[in-house]
Image: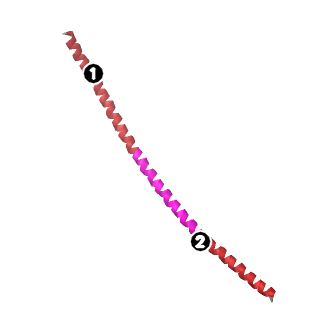
Amino acid sequence: MNIEMSLLFGAIGALLGVIGVIVTMKKDSKNQGAVEASISSKVDYIARGVDDIRLDLKDQARKIEAHNERLVRVEESAKQAHKRIDKVEGITHEN
C-alpha cells in the first residue's frame, strides 16, 4: 500500500510540475511579447524622430544655400560699388 501511495503522490507531483512549467512558460511568453511590443514602439518613435531631423537638416541646407547665393550677389554688388567709388574718387582727386 505504501508503494502505491508513493507512486500516486509521485505521479501527482510530476503532473503538478508539468502544469507549473506550462503556466510559467505562458506567463514568460506574455511578458516577452509585452517587452517586444514596447521595444518595437520605441524603435518606431526613434525612426520618426530621425526622419524629422533629416527633413529639418534638408530645410536648413536649402536655407544656407539661399543665403550663400544672396551673399555672392551682395559681394558682387559691393565690388561694383567699390569700382564706381574708386572712379568717383579718381575724378575728385584729379580736380
The residue at 80%/87% (across/down) is 2
* 80 lies above or below 34: above
For marks 1 and 2, the one nearer the N-term is: 2
Three-letter amino acid code at the position of disc 1: His
Specify whether 25 is left or right of 5. left
Residue position marked by numbered label 2 in the rendering: 27
Q: Position of residue 93 (x, y in %)?
A: 22, 11
Under tag 1, what secondary structure? helix
Q: Secondary structure at mark 2?
A: helix
- Residue 4 in percent (x, y) is at 79, 87
Q: Which of the 4 image quadrants contains residue 29?
A: bottom right
Q: For the point 24% across and 19% down, which residue is it? A: 85
Quarter assignment of residue 30: bottom right
| Residue name at image x 40 percent, y 47 percent | 56
| Image spot of residue 94 (x, y percent) | 21, 10
**Which quadrant does the C terminus fall into?**
top left
Instruction: Kindly give the residue lying farthest to the bottom in the view shown.
Output: 1
Start-end of magenta stretch: 29-57
Say which amino acid is labelled 2.
Lys
Magenta stretch, overall SS: helix
Locate the N terminus by quadrant: bottom right
The residue at the far top in this view is 94
Between marks 1 and 2 in the image, the one whose residue lies nearer the viewer: 2
Task: Rate crowding at label 1 as few (under 14), some (14 to 19) or many (20 or more) other CA atoms within 10 Å.
Answer: few
Which residue, given by chain and number where applicable, does mark 1 sit on?
Answer: 82
